[in-house]
Amino acid sequence: MASRPAPESPPAPAAAPDKGLRPDAVGFWDGLAVSLDSTAPAYSLAAVLGSLVVVAGTRAPAVLVLSFVPILGIAVAFHLLNRTDQDCGTTFAWVSRALGPAAGWLAGWGVLVTGVLVVGSLADVAATYLYDLLGLDALAGSRPVVVVTAVVLILAMTWLCARGTELSARVQRVLVLTQVGALLLFVVAAAVQLGRGGGALRPSLRWLSPVGLDTDALVPGLLLGVFLYWGWESALNLTEESRDRARAPGRAALVATVVLLLTYVGVAVAVLAVAGTGAVAGYADDAGLLGAVAAQVLGPFAPLLVLAIVTSGVASTQSTLLPASRTALSMAAAGAFPRLFGRVDPRTATPVAGTWVVGLASAAWYVGASLVSDRFLSDSLSALSLLVALTYALTGLACVVLWRRQLLRSWRALLLAGAAPLLGVATLLVLLVRAAAGLADPSGSATGRTVLGVGLPLAMAGFFVLAGVAVLLACRRTGGAFFARRGGATVDGQDAAAALGLSRVAGPGTSRAAAPAGWRCR
């Protein structure tokens, strides 16, 4: 009697290629510092809170809570995807496997472009507030001086990133303690002042309730909120350089989002209560808000909050270069980008050439934008918000596609890999469409300029997408194997069980044992 053939074993997991980065260089706390610093919490609050109060009044804290919901859904997606595939290219790598090489390439391009667009603005803020902190008002008001100083900061931070990940991480720890510590001190001092009967308004739990918020106010408020949280995922770009890289970077990103939520809500409530809505709204599009309110709360210690904004800009300038350079490295290692970006210096174990290209491109864009108009940078950030929403949405969608065969095998998979990312994707896409419609009107831009009948920010975002398509076609002509790949990969049962912390997922051949990234093609 013929014996039955043994069942075909699943394909062996594909080992991630060695890109030359130094393993175990950073830990959980380093990743947490990088994620927090990338969001520039002190500067972001100073720049956005006034506009948020104009939109939502005393319900600004509620908008911050609501905007956290889609961000949390996308953060869960990042965490699960990193549990099954540790690639420093994150969004690029995951979207490529789920939706195909073209979609993945454009997602990676979006990460690169947003990094280039924002670095100059961050350095500009750091330079302006540095002179303000030193009492050099004439220099702070001189655009040539500020621009030159900002360029020097960009080059210095680029050099620091190229010197080594460990050194960058140590600097990030110091900088995050400075800005978060100053914000915490401000909140505590404001609470004491309010407890003694001071302040313009009495805080209320209704400030945290979205009930009664007008839809027309909610959408722009949520857009501002998403911008405030952007950057929390930077720890995951260091996954190949992290200790416990399957878990620590994702946990650092998740913890960072929660820390940001508590920080933002605490500072927003404190500022509103101390200064009142009228005074706060007067600082729409003016990053001087926190400095002004700090004088009422901290007295002679008010410069500490200005120092926090300086360190916030410097820290974010540095930490924003890391995701862009690691994404370019991953794209080059996959054969999807010029080889220059894939060169890793054996001494520093960093992509030195790619880091410098990103840094110099950021400086060039900043100088060019500054020459056009001071407000051109504001329109750049508006264009950036569209690209951020798009790349986050693509990552959330990639999670659902990659986990599609596991979603109905456990309630945890359905909730974490399905419902949470889909909620984030749906919210971000709605915001993206509404924002694009608003920015199509030239009056919705800072410069008021029109390009091809639409506002400058929307035209700028469209330009970068089209430029990405052009570069994609140029890279495709090289005939790299990357562009011959197919999307539609799936997470297998063993990887899903390990990622979710389950003893097993329904179906044969699954166990609790963790495995390297294993992707089954359809």
Image (tube, rainbow, N blue to C red):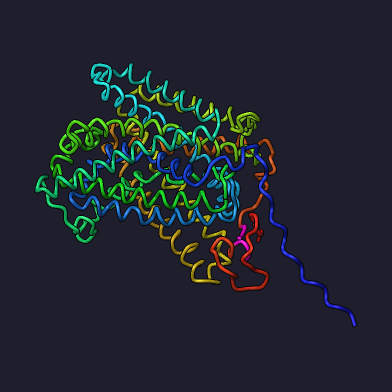
Q: Which residues are magenta?
A: 489-495
Eyeballing the image, is 54 above or below 371? below
Side (left or right) of 516 relative to 104: right
Toward which corner of the image does residue 132 lie, by quadrant? top left
Side (left or right) of 376 relative to 420: left
Residue beneath the point at 64% across and 68% down: 510
Residue 106 % position (x, y): 53, 43
Side (left or right) of 103 relative to 48: right
Eyeballing the image, is 139 above or below 21? above
Residue 490 is a magenta residue: yes
Residue 308 % position (x, y): 31, 34
- Camera-side residue of 193 and 120: 193
- Camera-side residue of 62 and 216: 62
- Camera-side residue of 66 and 161: 161
Eyeballing the image, is 89 above or below 509? above
In the current view of this chain or complex, which residue is farthest to the right? 1
Count of marks overlaid on the render: 0
Residue beneath the point at 22% across and 38% down: 284
Say if residue 234 shows up in the picture.
no
Say if residue 126 shows up in the picture.
yes
Residue 485 % position (x, y): 66, 49
Toward which corner of the image does residue 49 lie, by quadrant? top left
Quarter of the picture holding the N terminus: bottom right
Residue 243 is a magenta residue: no
Side (left or right) of 110 relative to 241: left
Quarter of the picture holding the C terminus: bottom right
Residue 194 % position (x, y): 14, 48
